[in-house]
């Protein structure tokens, strides 16, 4: 593959030189034809007095035209090579993403979900992690307010639970790690009798495709915060109580 790319570049670089050679041959043909044409008169004698004069005309005309077209040909060559580099880089990147995705799937098949339940004054907090031996590949925090906090804090008027700090290592992305943690968090919400769960997406911290992924996962945008960066999204879990049976495996 590397040899093929090298040959392509050599072929592109040679094109300007071949073009110059073609121009010189064309002018040589034109001048030879003109010199062999029968001209009765003084003009022919002045123009083509000897073969040396014919050669001088040919060289001068070829050099002049070459200087005119050669810069354009060089620019075309550079542009063509840049285009080839971009296409090859894109192809290599796609190939790398594909192999990385395969590797991620292999990693995902070995990771397992663990959690820690923290009992705070205002909330019950579930810290979920995706682990492979001693390495942590993904984290998610789920806050479920206690009754007094839900009644006194206006934040909880929009949702019964809140997901935050969702993060997956780059080496484990595109393997379903975040999807698994989100699904398990929603299972916990159902067990805790939460009808809605909310989260925030901030354009200063996450890419736009993350917001699209949340929406495809069933989260609906409720509002944009006053700072103009954070988007508050909520998912309705009222029809998810059939997940209770499957949630038992979470606490094994």
Image (cartoon, rainbow, N blue to C red):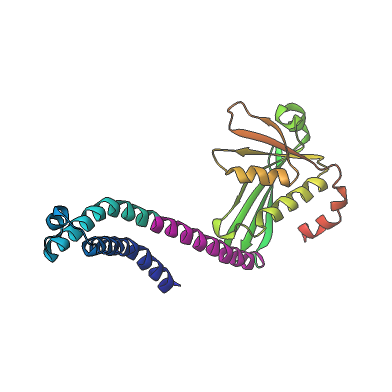
The residue lying toward the viewer, choosing from 219 and 110, is 219
Pinpoint residue 123: horizontal percent, then vertical percent: 71, 39
Does residue 142 appear in this view? no
**Does 236 appear above or below 81?**
above
Q: Residue at x 86, y 44 (%)?
A: 239
Pinpoint residue 32: horizontal percent, then vertical percent: 23, 64
Instruction: Judge from the rendering whether residue 39 lies leftward or rightward of residue 185; answer left or right.
Output: left
Instruction: Judge from the rendering whether residue 55 lies leftward or rightward of residue 17; answer left or right.
Output: left
The residue lying toward the viewer, choosing from 74 and 59, is 59
Magenta run includes residue 99: yes
**Does 83 appear above or below 146?**
below
**How would you classify the magenta stretch by its main secondary structure?**
helix
Magenta run includes residue 28: no
Does residue 79 appear in this view? yes
- What are the residue bounds of the magenta stretch? 80-109
Q: Quadrant of the C terminus?
A: bottom right
Quarter of the figure with residue 200:
top right
Pinpoint residue 60: horizontal percent, then vertical percent: 18, 56
The mark tally for this picture is: 0
Q: Residue at x 68, y 59 (%)?
A: 113
Pinpoint residue 48: horizontal percent, then vertical percent: 15, 59
Quarter of the figure with residue 214:
top right
The residue lying toward the viewer, choosing from 5 and 156, is 5
**Does 121 appear above or below 23?**
above
Instruction: Judge from the rendering whether residue 161 lies leftward or rightward of residue 24; answer left or right.
Output: right
Q: Residue at x 16, y 63 (%)?
A: 55
């Amino acid at each position: 593959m590397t040899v093929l790319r090298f040959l392509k570049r050599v072929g592109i670089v040679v094109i300007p030189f071949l073009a110059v050679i073609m121009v010189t041959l064309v002018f040589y043909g034109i001048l030879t034809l003109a010199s062999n044409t029968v001209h009765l008169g003084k003009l022919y004698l002045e123009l083509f007095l000897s073969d040396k004069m014919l050669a001088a005309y040919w060289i001068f005309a070829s050099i002049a035209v070459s200087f005119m077209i050669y810069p354009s040909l060089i620019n075309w060559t550079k542009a063509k090579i840049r285009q080839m580099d971009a296409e090859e880089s894109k192809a290599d990147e796609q190939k790398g993403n594909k192999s990385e995705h395969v590797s991620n799937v292999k990693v995902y098949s070995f990771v397992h979900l663990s959690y820690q339940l923290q009992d705070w004054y205002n909330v019950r907090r579930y810290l979920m992690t995706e682990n492979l031996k001693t390495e942590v590949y993904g984290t998610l925090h789920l806050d479920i307010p206690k009754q007094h906090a839900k009644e006194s804090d206006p934040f909880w008027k929009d949702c019964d639970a809140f997901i935050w700090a969702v993060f997956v290592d780059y080496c484990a992305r595109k393997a379903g790690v975040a999807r698994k943690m989100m699904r398990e968090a929603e299972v916990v919400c159902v067990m805790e009798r939460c009808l809605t769960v909310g989260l925030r997406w901030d354009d200063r911290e996450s890419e736009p495709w993350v917001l699209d992924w949340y929406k495809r996962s069933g989260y609906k945008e409720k509002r944009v915060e006053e700072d103009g960066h954070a988007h508050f999204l909520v998912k309705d879990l009222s029809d998810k109580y059939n997940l209770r049976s499957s949630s038992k495996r979470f606490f094994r």
